[in-house]
Amino acid sequence: MSILKRVVMCHQNIKVGNIMHTNQKILKNFFDTIIRIVSQGTSDTYATMILMKFNKENTSDFPFVKYINLYSKKMEINQKINSVNSKLVAKYITKLVNSIFSDLFKHLLKKNMSLELLKDFKKLGVKI
């Protein structure tokens, strides 16, 4: 492989690494992580019930939650959520984590989050 091709490939990888994912992908990864951790001690159904209850109680602050549908074995996040300001999504994530979870769970959540999601949270300004 020529040096020029290597430089181009490296440059493309750097660009991809700096791109933040869509709101839809960030929330999907976030909910997947929460559901996986909570269901280890309880069930998928219980985990999704907690999240949906939070969404229902916070619809006025975060109207975009209407685009989020969680089921015990399935998740649907409408693409329309990508048009929502990322700062508002960050506020939603922060409020959800601080309202529902203990410090111990926050530590466990952070430990189990993918590097990709941790980077997205950092870019959004979300601190767990």
Image (cartoon, rainbow, N blue to C red):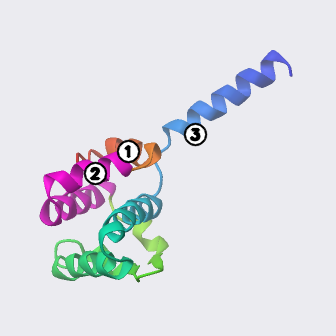
State if disc 3 and disc 2 touch (CB < 8 Å). no
Amino acid identity at mark 3:
Val
Q: Which residue is mark 3?
A: 16
x 33%, y 81%: residue:
66
- Residue 100, position as x, y percentages in the image: 16, 66
On the picture, is 13 further left or further right than 31?
A: right
- Between the residue at mark 1 and the residue at mark 3, the CA separation in whole angstroms equals 16 Å
Q: Which mark is residue 108?
A: 2
Instruction: Determine the main secondary structure of the stretch shown in magenta.
Output: helix
Q: Given this view, does label 1 or label 3 mark the residue nearer the observer?
A: 1
Asked whether 101 falls inside the magenta stretch, the response is yes
Q: Quadrant of residue 59?
A: bottom left
Q: What amino acid type should be assigned to the residue bearing mark 2?
A: Leu
- The mark lying in front, picked from 2 and 3, is 2
* Number of residues whose C-alpha sits closer than 10 Å to that of mark 3, classed few (under 14), some (14–19) or many (20 or more): few
Which stretch appears magenta? 86-112
Mark 2, Cα crowd under 10 Å, few <14 / some 14-19 / many 20+, is: few
Residue 8 appears left or right of 19: right
